[in-house]
Amino acid sequence: MRKGYNPYLLPDWLRKTRFYCKHISIPICGFQLIRVLIVPTTWDIILLVLLLFVCFLFYKNII
């Protein structure tokens, strides 16, 4: 079993997709936060929590 996570072992297209998703996740979370502050619905709050969780995983290099 391999120890640690090495993103360079991923295929090139997957590394690029991960890179772009990582950099677009913060603006999407910010937009969703503004939506939640204006009109807080249950769906928007759940979506914001999921987006923040995915953003956390990207920045901790777990995904």
Image: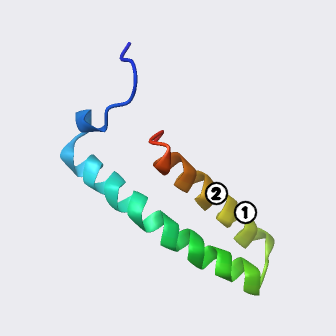
Quadrant where the N terminus lies? Answer: top left
Residue that sits furthest to the front in the current view: 60
> On the image, numbered disc 1 is attached to which residue?
46
**Amino acid at the residue labelled 2:** Leu
- Picture coordinates of residue 3, whole percent (x, y): 39, 18
Q: Residue 3, relative to residue 42: is it above or below?
A: above
Which one is in front, 59 or 2?
Answer: 59
Amino acid on which the number 1 mark rests in the picture? Ile
Q: Are marks 1 and 2 in contact (CB under 8 Å)?
A: yes
Query: Relative to the observer, which residue lies in front, 30 or 49?
Result: 30
Give residue 19's quadrant in the image: bottom left
- The residue sitting at the top extreme is 1
Residue drawn 61% across the image and 52% down it: 53
Spatial separation of the CA atoms under disc 1 and disc 2: 6 Å
Q: Is 42 rendered above or below residue 60? A: below
Measured as percent of width and height from the top left, residue 36 is found at: 72, 77
Q: Looking at the rendered structure, which numbered label has been put on residue 50?
A: 2
